Amino acid sequence: MTEGKTILTVDDSGSLRQMVTFVLKDAGYDVVEAVDGQDGLEKAKTRHIDLVLTDQNMPGMDGLGLIRALRTMKKYQSVPILMLTTETGDDIKAQGRAAGATGWIVKPFDPARLTEVVRKLIG
Amino acid sequence: MTIDMSQFYQVFFDEADELLAEMEKLLLNIDLAAPDDEDLNAIFRAAHSIKGGAATFGFTDITEVTHVLESLLDRIRKHEMTLTAEHVDAFLSSKDVLDMLMSGHRHGSAVDEAAVQTLRARLHELSEGKAAPTPAAAAPAAPAPVAGTPPAADAAGNFHLRIELPDVSAKDADALAGELGLMGTLTRDVLPDGRAVFTLVTTETADTIVAICAFVLDPDALRITDACAAAPAAAAAAPAADFGLYDTAAPAAASAPQTPAATPAAQAVAVPAAPAAQPAAETKNFGRRATDKEAGESSSIRVSVEKVDQLINLVGELVITQAMIDQRIAALDPIHHERLLNSANQLSRNTRDLQEAVMSIRMMPMDYVFSRFPRMVRDLAGKLGKKVEFVTKGAATELDKGLIERIVDPLTHLVRNSVDHGVEMPEKRRAAGKNEAGKLTLSAAHQGGNIVIEVSDDGGGLNRERILDKAKQNGLPVSDTMPDSEVWQLIFAPGFSTAEVVTDVSGRGVGMDVVKRNIAAMGGVVDIRSVPGSGTTISISLPLTLAILDGMLIKVGDEIYILPLGYVIESLQPAPVDVKEIAGQGKVVKVREEYLPLIPLYQIFAIEPKSEEPSEGILVILESEGKKAALLVDGLVGQQQVVVKNLESNFRKVAGISGATILGDGGVSLILDVAALLRSSRQLNADSLCF
């Protein structure tokens, strides 16, 4: 059921972005990459995105900023947004929730786990 | 699903290299008195990104080092700690250790475990020992964790309690939040499994909390711990919590503070919203840097050098073919073939544009080389007890990648020399009325078809007497009346060093000759300017690229040779009266009130010329390494861009010839090694001109 589903992955680290893209493409999703929050926002505006996967700590607009910005847009009111974060601290999770994230995944993550969570959300 | 992570290693390493280089650059430029927040953030982010990647790709050793580094940087960027020189030193050594670890993973090179341990201990020490006294407001993070139960009160008599609720309905949790919110400052959060957890700063004891909660839930299911110790405990207790989804109601609850529904619960929830505002403020600060970085990242791709070189070779072939076409059509009647000729001209222009564009791919900014020096100069100066202010100019000047890589070693040597021998000790500088800190300038600039790179210091300058003495000792042919410029060139003689003390920095007597040889091999020349007491400038002039050069085609007998245009000053037909014979030493020619040695090219290559008489041929005035000479040829053929083919790798090394090329008519022509020609002309001896 992954036919035609597009995921936007936002990360300033090229290696992680490539890895995530590889895993998600392997699972049958289309993937759009963005290098930071601002880039992610631009790409989200011009495309149809079914799920957003964003890093938190990025130059410019960070993950939380992107989530907040997306949630103000009508077409992203209910699109699942996952936050990738290295911080396991509770406050970042609270901030993520407050910003409107759907969930979070701690880096480093198991590729299988990533697909599992994504499947749970968009099938 | 298992995927092969190793396919991403290279990208990770390249990325980490860039991040480390960026980090080093920022650290070297940081102003300890007033560090720029943006810089601190960028340094933190570099460590953070490397950690994220290393953890993902399983480089545990790198993760561990970056983790400690990151935590320390985090505290500094949040101003919980003041940045000191000690920190900068530790961060710089972290960069070195990380380089070493990465190189270990990449190339299997040796890793100095002791250095890694020392660094980690040092970073730990710094993060523990130097905590700035922070007000009690930052209490949950700052004070030393108090392990175990019962929870201890802080200085103000407050307990920081972490209250984990069992699985209860959202309504019950809200009710409890309302009750507990009345007892102190409450923050509310959600556990990975969806249960609620509160952090309460209160003067009440844990027992009171249990009593209150007992109204809505089973007290035995309630877990109350010291909030300061809770974070690691939670991490240990729930290792599987590597992801989590908020329940759907959560975002709505979180936005509650903005709605008029001001129930006690909503007020309580308002507390965690406060820290969320902070990153938003940070976001604004990041703005400027972000646009720079974004522009850089989204507009470049990585391509292997082989592909670029293949492209350049192909364009080289195209240039040759173009020259052939140009030559063939030159013979055509311009009226009959007007349209063909126009098209050919158009093609010619396109070829040239294409060639320039392709060559520019290989061009890299000098910053690639310059960026490694600030650190080196800093370390060196520290080691020698000197003060050196390092300045770079023209770091954006571009040079062919092949040359850039080969210039690194010679330049490193020259910079080391300047710090070691050029810049004096602070006392000596003070005594001479100079600024205590010496100034070392590294600059690059385009000059015609060349790039000129200069290493310049304001130190003591070269010592003429000492160089001459040393040269005499070494048995070099010198005279006391030699001009300065020739004396300075002596330091390039093999085995020459005037350093009074041989240090481990430089002065082992090898090097300057290697520097000169390396640069000459790149088609460059080294020039020295030095003024006693006010410093030395070593200037390197290099062709921008080795692959293609502008050549002047000259003819002797039936042969056509190519002179690199950069060496040609002018060409003229001498009056017989200007040519003078010096007994046994060949001829000289008077050009603009200056006598220049005359080099008859026919003599060098033993060719039968049209005429041996200089006044019937053409003199091409050449200049190299500050020396001029007049080359006698039969005639000038024209100018052309030629693709340099290496003679050594295709045939063998030939003295006096630096390479070969293919002409428009398909014939092979040799490119003259002008520098070697002029060197051999110095003795003004006709015999010595024969190779």
Image (cartoon, coloured by chain):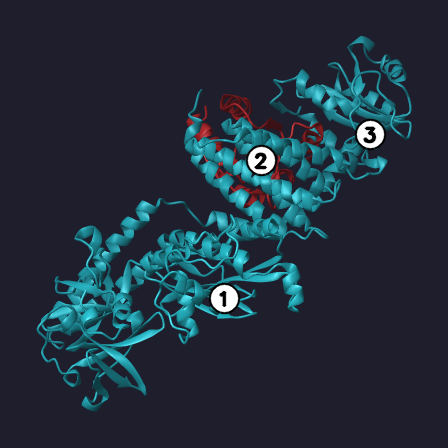
Chain colours: A red, B cyan
* B279 relative to B338 in the view: left or right: right
Point out the residue furthest to the bottom here.
Answer: B577
Q: Is label 3 or label 1 in front?
A: 1
Q: Is label 1 or label 2 in front?
A: 1
Nearer to me, B470 or B96: B470
Q: Which mark is residue B122?
A: none
Could you tell me which residue is drawn at 12 percent across and 61 percent down? B666
Nearer to me, A32 or B131: B131
Q: Looking at the rendering, in which quadrant would you find the N terminus of chain B?
A: top left
> Residue B38: x percent and y percent?
65, 49
Read off the residue under disc 3: B268
Q: Are marks 3 and 2 in contact (CB under 8 Å)?
A: no
Could you tell me which residue is drawn at 59 percent across and 38 percent down? B94
Instruction: Indicate the chain on which mark 1 is placed.
Output: B
Q: Which mark is residue B462?
A: 1
The alpha-carbon separation of the residues under discs 1 and 2 comes to 56 Å
The alpha-carbon separation of the residues under discs 3 and 2 comes to 29 Å
The answer to whether residue A16 of the structure is visible from this angle is no
Badge 1, how many Cα within 10 Å: few under 14, some, many 20+? Answer: many
Upstream in the sequence, badge 3 or badge 1? 3
Instruction: Indicate the chain on which mark 2 is placed.
Output: A
* B367 relative to B659 in the view: left or right: right
The alpha-carbon separation of the residues under discs 3 and 1 comes to 75 Å
Q: Is residue A115 above or below residue B656?
A: above
> Residue A24: x percent and y percent?
46, 29
Read off the residue under disc 2: A55
Could you tell me which residue is drawn at 63 percent across and 60 percent down? B437
